[in-house]
Amino acid sequence: MTRLERNDRIIRLALLLVAFSAVSILIVITAFIFSEGTPIMFRHGPGRFLLGLDWYPSEKLFGLLPMIVGSFSVTAGALLVGVPTSLACAVVLTQFASKRTARVLKPVIELLAGIPSVVYGFIGIVVIVPFIRDNLGGPGLSVLAAAIVLGIMILPTVISISVDAFQALPPSYREGSIALGATVWQTVRMVLLPAARSGIVAAVILGMGRAIGETMAVIMIAGNAAAVPTSPLAPVRTLTSNIALEMGYASGEHREALFATGVILFVIIMILNTLANRASARRKV
Amino acid sequence: MAGSPRRTQTIVKSALWTLTGATILVLVFIVVFILRRGLPEVSWGFLTRHPEAMGVAGGIFPTIVGTLALTLMAILIATPLGVGTAIYLTEYTWEGRLTRVIRFGAECLAGIPSILFGLFGFILFVTKLKLGWSILSGGLTLSFMILPTIIRTSEEAIRSVPAAYREVSASLGCTKWQAVTRVVLPSALPGITTGVILSVGRSIGETAAVIFTAGSALHLPTSVFSSSRTMAVHFYILAREGISMRMAYGTAAVLVVTILFINIVSYYLMHRFIRKYS
C-alpha cells in the first residue's frame, strides 16, 4: 500500500510538470519573439518602427505604420461584415429556429470552421477579387476583398461563442419577458442582448483576434503593397503578411525587423486575449 | 398601434432569417465550388503519383505522405501533454490560482496566430536547434499549436464522467491513479478522441506555421529530418504562384473532403458521448 501511495505522489508530481507545458510553451514563445524582435526596435527607436511610413528593408527603413493601419482596417472591415451577420445567426439559432432546424444548422456552421484558411483565400482569388475588379474598379486585390473574406472566416467563431452566451442565460429571463406580453424580438432586444452582452463582447474580441492573426488568406487577396491604404479598393499589407511574405529570404536586420513585426502582432493579440478573458470572466460572476 | 410590435417582429424576423440563410449559403457555396471544380481532377493516379514539373502535372502523393507524417508527429507529442494537463486539472487539484494560471496559459496559446508559431518554430527548431526544415520541426511547432484544443476537450470529457464512478473506485480501495487509468480515462476516451480528431483536422489545414518549419520540398520524406510539403502548403504554392489552377483545384478538393470527413466523424463521436452521459 505504501508503494502505491508513493507511486501516486510521483505521478502527481509528473502530472503537475505536464500541466505546466502550455504555460511554459507560452513563456518560451514570448521570450523568443521578444528577444529577437525588440533589440532592433530600441536600436532604431520604437517611434520609427511604430510611426514610420516607409518599409524599405534594403535601405534599413523599417516603418511599420502602413502594416499596422492595414491590419486594423482589414479587421474593422471584417467585423463590419461578420459581427451583424453572426449576431443574426446566433439570435435565429437560439430564439427563432425550431429545435430541429437549429440542430441541423449549427453543425453545418461549425463544420465549416474547419475549412483551411488557404481555401478561403483561394475562393477570394477566383471569386471575390475578379468581382471587385470588374464591378467596382481598382486592382481587385484590396482592403475590401480581405474584409469580406475575413468577415466570412470569423463567422463560425463569433456565432458559436454568441450562441453559448445566449444559451447560458437562465430560461426564466425569456419566459418572464414573454409572459409579460413582449414579442420574441422585444425580448431579444431588451432582455437577452443586454444580459448576454459580456459573452457577445468576448465573441467579437475573439473574432477580431482571429481576423488580425489570419495570414495565408490575406496574403492571397489583399495585394500586399506596403503603403497606407487610401480607399477600400486600394491594396493593403497586414502585419501577418509582412512576416510571411519576407521571412523566406530575409537575413540580418531585415529578419530582426520581421520579428519586431511579430512583437507588435503579439502585443495586440495579448491585449485582445486579456480583454476577452475579462469580458467572459464578468459573465461568470 | 397595438399591432406594431408584432409587425416589427415579423420584419426583423425575416431580416435575421435572410442573414442566416445567406451565411449558410456562402459556406455551402465554398464547399460546392471547390468540389465541383476539383473532384473531376481527382483520380487514383492523382493520389498516388509524384508531381511533375513543380506540380504542373502528375499527382500529389508526396504531399499526402508529408501531411500524414507531420500530423502524426504533432498528435504524438501533443496528446500526452494535453491529456496529462487535463487529468491534473480535473483529478489532482482544486480550483485556485494554479489552475487559473494553467488555464490562462492555454487560452493565450490558443489565441496566438499561426504565423507567430511559424516564426517561433523557424527561429528555435529550424535555426537555433539546427533541425532544419523538417518533419520534426514542423511537428513540434504544430503540436504546440494544437495543445490548447486537446487540453480543453480532454478536460471537458473527463469532467463529464459522473462523480459516482470515482467514488465507487475509491470505496473499493483504488488509488487515485488506478481510478484515473482504469475508470475515468476509459469512460472519457470518446470525448478525448474527439479533441484529438479535431486537432488532426486543424493540423491538416494549417499552412502558415508549417511552411516555415517543415519547408516545401516536393520529394518523398525519408526520415523525420527530411523537409516535407503538406497538401495545404502545396495548394497554397500552386494557387499563389499560378503554377496550375487544375492541380490547385484537385488538391483543394482532396483537402476539403478530408477535413469535412474528419470534422463530421468528430462531431458524430462527440454527440454519442454527450448523449451517453446526459
Image (cartoon, coloured by chain):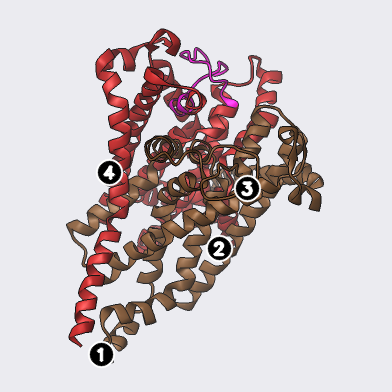
Chain colours: A red, B brown
Instruction: Please rate how many residues cluster around mark 2, counting C-alpha atoms within 10 Å: few if below 14, some from 14 to 19, many from 20.
Output: some
Give the alpha-carbon distance from disc 1 to disc 4, as whole Å.
40 Å
The tag earlier along the polypeptide, 1 or 2, is 1
Is label 1 on the same chain as label 2?
yes
| Three-letter amino acid code at the position of disc 1 | Gly
SS label for mark 1: loop
Q: Are marks 1 and 2 in contact (CB under 8 Å)?
A: no
Which residue occupies the foreground of this view, B1 or B67? B67
Is label 3 on the same chain as label 2?
yes
Q: Are marks 3 and 2 in contact (CB under 8 Å)?
A: no
Q: Is residue A2 left or right of residue A115?
A: left
Residue for badge 2 = B267
Is label 1 on the same chain as label 4?
no
Q: Which residues are magenta?
A: A221-243
Which residue occupies the foreground of this view, B89 or B137? B137
Output the chain of dot 2: B
Q: Are marks 1 and 4 in contact (CB under 8 Å)?
A: no
| Three-letter amino acid code at the position of disc 2 | Tyr
Residue B109 spot, x, y in % from top left: 35, 46
SS label for mark 2: helix
Instruction: Please rate how many residues cluster around mark 4, counting C-alpha atoms within 10 Å: few if below 14, some from 14 to 19, many from 20.
Output: few
Give the alpha-carbon distance from disc 3 to disc 4, as whole Å.
39 Å
Is label 3 on the same chain as label 4?
no
Residue B7 spot, x, y in % from top left: 55, 45
Residue for badge 3 = B24
Residue A217 visible to the viewer: yes
Q: Nearer the viewer, mark 3 or mark 2?
A: 2
Q: Quarter of the image containing the C terminus of chain B?
A: bottom left
Residue for badge 4 = A27
